[in-house]
Image (spheres, rainbow, N blue to C red):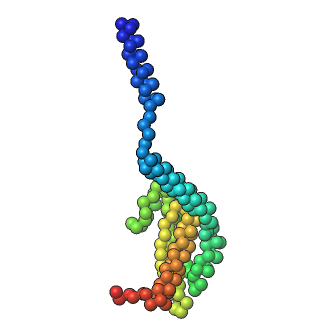
């Protein structure tokens, strides 16, 4: 019995030794493909890291009501109005409110035109905090301005056809 144990242990050592010491050479194109895959993944990781760093370092447009007043005053030169509604725990919220585990902040804002002082834009944004609601309002207006500039550029280039 003792010799049988030795034989099986000795056999295991031989198998392990053959696996550890032996290797097969891969063809050159496989080595090149693996190297290129590693390089591509490294470049992708670097690009993702750069993107995340830039995104986190991006200055916030507004962080309080005074900055929101100043920025919206520039973005809406003919006047604007905003109304905040804070919903407490368990308070009924409108049907179009997003699902949330925390109390919501609703911000309704309007932009007025120069001539008749009528409402040109009326929007509602939802956020978890007042600061985030103010940021969303400013981002909304900046998006509107960008779209207006694109439309004006397309119209001046003759590329804008509404009846197509």
Looking at the image, which residue sits at the far left? 164
Snapshot quadrant of residue 138: bottom right
In this view, 150 is above or below 83: below
Residue visible at 58% across and 86% down? Answer: 78
In this view, 18 is above or below 99: above
Q: Nearer the viewer, residue 145 or 13?
A: 13
Q: Nearer the viewer, residue 57 or 111?
A: 57
> Image check: 103 left or right of 65?
left
Q: Nearer the viewer, residue 49 or 13?
A: 13
Residue 154 drawn at (x, y percent):
47, 86
> Image check: 9 left or right of 109?
left
Residue 105 drawn at (x, y percent):
51, 65
Residue 85 drawn at (x, y percent):
51, 68
In this view, 70 is above or below 14: below
Residue 41 drawn at (x, y percent):
49, 53
Count of numbered circles on the image: 0
> Image check: 29 left or right of 135?
left
In this view, 162 is above or below 136: below
Pick the quarter of the image with the N terminus: top left
Pick the quarter of the image with the C terminus: bottom left
Residue visible at 36% across and 10% down? Answer: 4
Residue visible at 59% across and 77% down? Answer: 72
Residue 84 appearing in the image: no
Residue visible at 43% across and 29% down? Answer: 19
Residue 113 appearing in the image: yes
């Amino acid at each position: 019995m003792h010799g049988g144990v030795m034989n099986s242990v000795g056999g295991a050592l031989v198998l392990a030794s053959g696996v550890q010491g032996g290797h097969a050479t891969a063809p050159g194109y496989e080595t090149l493909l693996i190297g290129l895959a590693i390089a591509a993944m490294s470049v992708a990781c670097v690009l993702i890291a750069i993107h995340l760093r830039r995104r986190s370092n991006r200055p916030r447009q507004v962080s309080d009501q005074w900055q929101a007043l100043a920025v919206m005053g520039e973005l809406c030169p003919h006047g604007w109005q905003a109304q905040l509604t804070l919903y407490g725990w368990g308070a009924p919220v409108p049907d179009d409110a997003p699902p949330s585990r925390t109390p919501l902040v609703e911000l309704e804002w309007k932009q007025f035109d120069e001539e008749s002082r009528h409402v040109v834009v009326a929007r509602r944004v939802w956020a978890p905090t007042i600061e985030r609601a103010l940021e969303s309002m400013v981002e909304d207006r900046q998006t509107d301005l960008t779209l207006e500039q694109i439309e004006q550029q397309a119209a001046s280039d003759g590329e804008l056809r509404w009846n197509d």
